[in-house]
Image: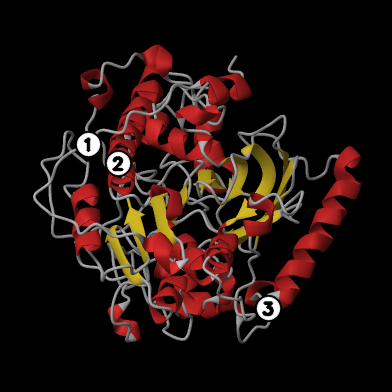
Amino acid sequence: MFHLKEIFMNSKHIFLSTLVGPLVIPSLNAAETNRPNILFVISDDQSYPHASAYGSPIAKTPAFDFVARNGWLFNNAFVTSPGSSPSRASILTGLYPWQIAEAGTHASSFPAKYKCFPDILAEAGYHVGCTGKGWGPGDWKISGRKHNPAGPEYNKRHIQPPFKGVSNTDYYQNFKEFLHARKEKQPFYFWVGSREPHRPYEKNSWKKANRKLADAKVPSFLPDKEAIKGDLLDYGTEIEWYDSQLSCILDTLKEEGELENTLIIVMADNGMPFPAAKATCFEYGIHIPMAICWIGKINEGGISDEFVSGVDLAPTILDAVGIPNKGQMIGISLLPYLQKKRKDTGRTMVFAGRERHASARYNNWGYPSRALRTKDFLYIRNFRPERWPAGDPCAIDKKGKLEAMHSAYYDIDQCPAWDFIVSNRDDREIYPYFLKAAGKRPYEELYNVSTDPGCLHNLVGNGKCTEKLNNLRKEMDKLLKKTKDTRYLDDPTQDDIWETYPRLSGAMRTFPAPLLTD
């Protein structure tokens, strides 16, 4: 049993590794501008609680822990979508995915009318850039944007990655090159988009990292088997690699005298790439790790149970640099809470949703869902329960022939964990895991995540939960009406507008038509 507070408070001081690169960075002090620098760090596919600051044995994350120890560690941080593209677009705009048209689905475009906080910072005189994965997947050029919505890209520096599947982008050296390009005394904003721990992984990389199967704590929605444990440890190995790059970046901030004048936000874009996690509105699809620090301006806050949403990051950043939120963003600034001017964030619940993820169904259809998370409960509304939530079971190959049943489900990342579940689905012990990940779901789901974080027991229909269910229905209706969600408004001319948004990147697949196409 891990005692979070004890682990957090007694962790050793981080020793940031200093790697001397060929770039000579001018000695600058952005503090003279009285405006903070912004370092925004986002991993790709990482669930809460997979960082060592939370006591997780899957990965050692000293850099993340350093940020948490010098600021705030959040137990209840949630993204607004369980997929990269809509989640990142929501973070950048401060709006929910269903408010931003094509940008609210996967692998489409990003209409220029939705302003992103990096552009606002650039207009305010900030030196702006990003490395690794910015907004995506999708096509921002088709929307007429001059650069990735996360910022102009700095991706020229590369490394020889330690494991197959790890990106060869040198986030650290690209950050140094970015700093070298700024003007004297110019404050900066930089987005570090780690491509880890996105799949694929080098199988058994955990062995090279000297890990043990006993280190893997298997969540309840996955079978506790060696194949699953090994896959979890490979995932943890990529988290550790990404964290080592963050260590070098923090080192650079310290060397340049900028550490204390930089607001640092570290988070993930969505949950872990495992069945019943990523691309779902279940707990492990939207609940992510987050730490925020601003040494000297945000006192060491400790561990927070306050709710934080992905839409809150943009308003928080603009508040920190003194730019008012003029009403476009629906998120709230966390700064008063972070600086202990407020006792709470003002949030008692968060919202999330999804439309299309992969090309996984007939006619490029998605699986529209909305979710509401409170302290103890997760309520999910599935607007098209007749569709397969993880994608159609089989596809049509290039020769026009039907592939084998249970060979598709493309909303689930192909991986050893899923291969094991599919291969053993006829086993009575394993079948429930297969059904949880791929089986059809009802219109409504309700889970007590305080006792059932794996979302295994749907409480809809349980008489003891009727009042709770009705209250959550009302709260969701209120928010979706306020934000003009076309799914909720049930306008027949607008409800399926999501199906018209083009898919502009990634594989396009063909599937047999369903028996019922309504």
Q: Secondary structure at mark 1?
A: loop
Q: Amino acid at mark 2?
A: Asp
The answer to the question of whether label 1 and label 3 lie on touching residues, with beta carbons closer than 8 A, is no
**x, y (%) of residue 60?**
39, 26
Is 292 displayed left or right of 12 in the figure? right
**x, y (%) of residue 471?**
86, 55
Q: Nearer the viewer, residue 8 or 360?
A: 8
**x, y (%) of residue 495?**
61, 78
**x, y (%) of residue 443?**
69, 56
* Distance between mark 1 and mark 3 Cα atoms: 49 Å
* Residue at which label 3 appears: 484
How many numbered badges does the structure rendering display?
A: 3
Q: Amino acid at mark 3?
A: Lys
Q: Is residue 111 above or below residue 357?
A: below
Q: Amino acid at mark 1?
A: Thr
The quarter of the picture where residue 184 lies is: bottom left
Residue at the image point whose x is 18% and y is 59% from the top: 177
Residue 251 is tagged as 2
Quadrant the N terminus occupies = top right
The answer to the question of whether label 1 and label 2 lie on touching residues, with beta carbons closer than 8 A, is yes
In primary-sequence order, the first of circles 3 and 2 is 2
* Residue at which label 1 appears: 18
Quadrant the C terminus occupies = bottom right
Q: Is residue 396 above or below residue 74?
A: below
Q: Can you see residue 442?
A: no
Query: Marks 1 and 3: which is nearer the front?
Result: 1
